[in-house]
Amino acid sequence: AEATRERLATELRTLPEKMRVMKEELVTLSDLEKLRDEGEEQKKALETELKQLKEKLSPTESAVLEATNKLKSIQASLDGNEMYTKLNALEEQLAQLETRKTVLEEDIASITLKADYEPLKKQAIDELALLNKKIIEDLSSIKSY
């Protein structure tokens, strides 16, 4: 019973809005002649646009076909050209050399990091200085006797 009351209350609240929308639709639909005329105008406009596009289609297709044939012709003449073939081979060789150069640079950087003797050199010099100091002290103590 409670659910039915809520549904009825909701229906009563939305009823004025539904009626307003239906009246607007009724006004629109009652002028059926106007709707037909508008639909006919849209149809004619679309047919005209379709005709124009079809007229443009043929020249466009022939231009694309002509460009494709020209491209094929140029490609065929290039493929038969010795200089073009050599240039392609040199470009491939250059790409391989650049790759090899990158690998070698990485190897050199890795080896350089492994061969960093600077800390070891500093430690050796410090040890040497300490030994020299001790020798000097020992020599000084011997002279004292």
Image: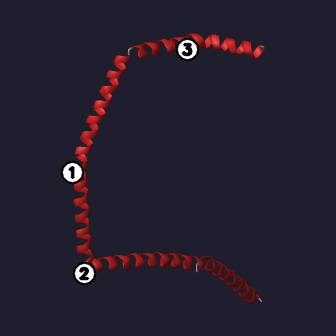
38, 66: nearer the viewer = 38
Which amino acid type corresponds to the residue marked 3 in the rendered image? Lys
Residue drawn at the location 40% of the way across and 75% of the way down: 95
Tell me, yes or no, whether the two marked residues, 1 and 2, touch with CB atoms within 8 Å: no
Residues packed near mark 2 inside 10 Å, few (<14), some (14 to 19) or many (20 plus): few
Residue drawn at the location 42% of the way across and 16% of the way down: 29
Rendering coords of residue 109 (x, y %): 53, 76
The residue tagged 3 is 18
Q: Is residue 6 above or below residue 121?
A: above
10, 110: nearer the viewer = 10
SS type, badge 3: helix
Residues packed near mark 3 inside 10 Å, few (<14), some (14 to 19) or many (20 plus): few
State which quadrant residue 41 falls in. Answer: top left
Q: CA distance from mark 2 to mark 3?
A: 81 Å
Quadrant location, the C terminus: bottom right
25, 71: nearer the viewer = 25
The residue tagged 2 is 82
SS type, badge 1: helix
Rendering coords of residue 9 (x, y %): 68, 11
